[in-house]
Image (spheres, helix red, strand yellow):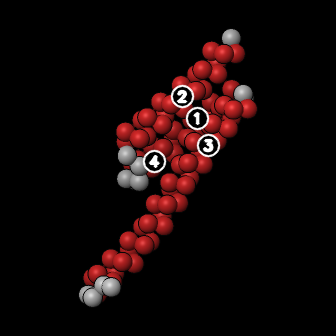
Amino acid sequence: MANTAQARKRVLQNEKRRLHNASLRSRLRTYVKGVLKAVHVGDQEQARSALRAAESVIDKTVGKGVAHRNMAARTKSRLSARVKAMGNAAQ
């Protein structure tokens, strides 16, 4: 247990930050799932718009320090490859 006032305050701050970061990570996963769902359904236009929205959310979470930039780059690359493959398969 925290013994000093500073330590008690840090416990409260850490819990508040943990909950906020969890919310941001959840939002990130939700947007990624939206792209994957659109790809699975086969709606190319919806997949493209979902990809744009997901890339924005991914970049914002990296900027806030919640996600690592390499994870973001890897995720965006994989999602865009899936959306691009949809376009190639449709032709």
Q: Looking at the picture, does residue 22 appear above or below residue 12?
A: above
Residue underneath mark 1: 51
> CA gap, disc 2 to disc 1?
7 Å
Q: Nearer the viewer, mark 3 or mark 1?
A: 3
Image coords of residue 1 (percent x, y)? 33, 85
Residue underneath mark 2: 80
Residue underneath mark 4: 60
Q: Secondary structure at mark 4?
A: helix
Residue underneath mark 3: 33
Q: Nearer the viewer, residue 8 or 59?
A: 8
* Sequence-first disc among 4 and 3: 3
Image coords of residue 4 (percent x, y)? 26, 87
Disc 3 crowd, CA 10 A, few/some/many (<14, 14-19, 20+): some
* Sequence-first disc among 3 and 2: 3
On-image quarter of the C terminus: top right
| Residue type beneath disc 2 | Ser
Label 3–label 2 contact, CB within 8 A: no
Q: Looking at the picture, does residue 80 appear above or below residue 13?
A: above
Q: In which quarter of the view is residue 12 placed?
A: bottom left
* Sequence-first disc among 4 and 1: 1
Label 2–label 1 contact, CB within 8 A: yes
**Residue displayed at 50% across by 54% down:** 25
Q: Residue furthest top?
A: 91
| Res 63 label | none
